C-alpha cells in the first residue's frame, strides 16, 4: 500500500505552554481606570475668592486664603460649596477654631446633627474623639451615620492634638468607585437596596448595655445600593463596611459575597486622597460622595479630634 504525503503548510510557531490559570471574577484588577472629577458636561471653572490647591487629580483640595473663624460672606460660601461638590473634601491648614466657630462654619450648610452614640465635646452637636486611652476604631472604610434615615450631608473635623507620627485620614471618591464597576455589576446593582444598622459599626468598642438603649432610636433602615447625589446627579456607591448588613431580597450568602466585592471598591488608591494632619487643621467633606478611613498607626500616642456633622437628606 502506498501512502501519499499530505501537502505541507506553514504554521505559526507555538508559544510556551502555560499551566491553567484564572483570576477570580470578583477581584480588583490592574489597568486603566476612569478618573472623572466633575459630572459629565460640567465646566471646570477657576475659583476667584480663595486659592485652591488640588491634592490629586480626582479628590481633595487645600483651600488657602480663608479665615474660618470669621463669618463667611455669601459669595465665599457659595464658591466653597462649589469646591466641595467638585473636590469632595476640602482641607484648611492652621485654623485653630473654637468649637463655637467650628459649629458656625458647619451651620452654613444646614442644621447640625447630634450623635448620642459617641462622646460629646462642649456641645451636644460636637463629637469628641480622644484616642489617648480608647483604641482607635475608625480604621475601616465607611460613610458617617448611614444607619439614619437621613445620613449626614457632610462633616467638619478639626484635629486638636496630633501624634508625633501617623494618624492620617484617607477619603475615597465613591462616584469613581461606581464609574469603574464592570458593566455587568452596574446592571446587577441597579435598583437594589441594602439594610444599614448602627450595631455592627459600634459593637466593636461599645458595651451591649449602652447599645441596647438606642435600638428604638436607630432601627435598621434601607438605602439604595447606588444613590444619586442630590446636587451633582452623579451615581455613587452607597454601601460601607461599618453599617451595611445585607442586600434586601438576596439570600444571605449571595448578599455577603456581593457586599464584600462592593466594599473593596473604596480600597483603590486612584480614588483616594490622604491627609497628614497638623494641630488646628480642618477638613470638610461631602459624606454623600465619599467614604473615609482614619489610620490607626499611632499606638501609645494621643490624637484628639472634634467633629461637627450637617444633617442630610434621605438617599434616593
Image: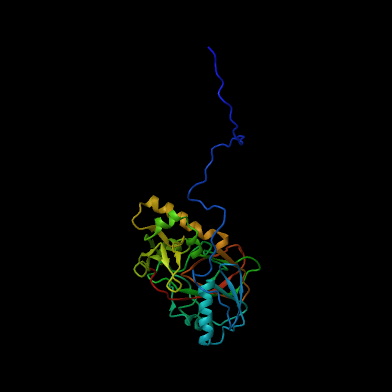
Relative vertical location of residue 47 with respect to residue 236 in this rendering, above or below: below
Query: In front here: 235 or 153?
Result: 235
The quadrant in which the C terminus is found is bottom left
Q: Position of residue 211 (x, y in %)?
A: 40, 65
Q: Residue furthest top?
A: 1
Residue appearing at x 58%, y 66% in the figure? 273
Quarter where residue 199 is shown: bottom left
Quarter where residue 166 is shown: bottom right
Q: Residue furthest right?
A: 164
Marker count (numbered): 0
Query: In front here: 15 or 6?
Result: 6
Query: In front here: 212 or 23?
Result: 23
Relative vertical location of residue 316 with respect to residue 4 in this rendering, above or below: below
Q: Position of residue 183 (x, y in %)?
A: 45, 55
* Residue 128 appears in view: no
Q: What coloring was used for the rendering?
A: rainbow
Q: Report whether 189 appears left or right of 52.
A: left
Q: Position of residue 260 (x, y in %)?
A: 46, 54
Q: Report whether 133 appears left or right of 118.
A: right
Quarter where residue 16 is shown: top right
Query: In front here: 3 or 96?
Result: 3
Q: Position of residue 276 (x, y in %)?
A: 62, 69
Relative vertical location of residue 114 with respect to residue 146 in this rendering, above or below: below
* Residue 250 appears in view: yes
Amino acid at each position: 500500500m502506498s501512502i501519499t504525503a499530505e501537502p505541507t503548510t506553514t504554521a505559526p510557531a507555538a508559544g510556551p505552554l502555560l499551566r491553567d490559570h484564572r483570576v477570580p471574577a470578583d477581584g480588583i484588577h490592574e489597568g486603566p481606570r476612569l478618573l472623572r472629577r466633575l459630572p459629565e458636561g460640567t465646566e471646570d471653572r477657576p475659583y476667584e475668592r480663595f486659592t485652591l490647591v488640588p491634592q490629586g487629580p480626582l479628590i481633595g483640595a487645600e483651600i488657602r486664603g480663608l479665615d474660618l473663624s470669621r463669618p463667611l460672606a455669601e459669595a465665599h460660601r457659595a464658591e466653597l460649596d462649589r469646591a466641595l461638590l467638585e473636590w469632595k473634601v476640602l482641607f484648611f491648614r492652621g485654623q485653630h477654631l473654637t468649637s463655637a466657630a467650628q459649629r458656625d462654619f458647619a451651620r452654613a450648610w444646614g442644621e447640625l446633627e447630634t450623635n448620642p452614640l459617641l462622646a460629646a465635646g462642649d456641645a451636644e452637636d460636637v463629637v469628641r474623639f480622644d484616642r489617648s486611652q480608647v483604641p482607635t476604631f475608625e480604621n475601616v472604610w465607611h460613610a458617617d451615620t448611614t444607619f439614619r434615615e437621613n445620613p449626614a450631608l457632610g462633616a467638619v473635623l478639626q484635629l486638636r492634638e496630633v501624634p508625633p507620627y501617623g494618624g492620617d485620614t484617607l477619603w475615597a471618591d465613591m462616584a469613581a468607585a461606581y464609574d469603574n464597576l464592570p458593566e455587568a455589576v452596574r446592571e446587577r446593582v441597579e435598583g437594589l437596596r441594602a439594610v444599614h444598622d448602627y450595631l455592627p459599626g459600634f459593637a466593636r468598642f461599645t458595651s451591649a448595655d449602652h447599645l441596647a438603649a438606642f435600638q428604638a432610636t436607630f432601627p435598621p433602615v434601607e438605602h439604595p445600593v447606588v444613590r444619586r447625589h442630590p446636587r451633582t446627579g452623579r451615581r455613587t456607591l452607597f454601601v460601607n463596611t461599618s453599617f451595611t448588613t445585607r442586600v434586601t431580597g438576596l439570600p444571605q450568602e449571595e448578599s455577603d459575597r456581593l457586599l464584600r466585592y462592593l466594599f473593596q471598591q473604596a480600597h483603590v488608591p486612584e480614588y483616594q486622597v490622604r491627609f497628614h494632619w497638623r494641630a488646628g487643621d480642618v477638613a470638610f467633606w461631602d459624606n454623600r460622595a465619599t467614604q473615609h478611613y482614619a489610620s490607626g498607626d499611632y499606638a501609645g500616642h494621643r490624637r484628639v479630634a472634634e467633629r461637627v456633622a450637617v444633617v442630610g437628606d434621605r438617599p434616593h
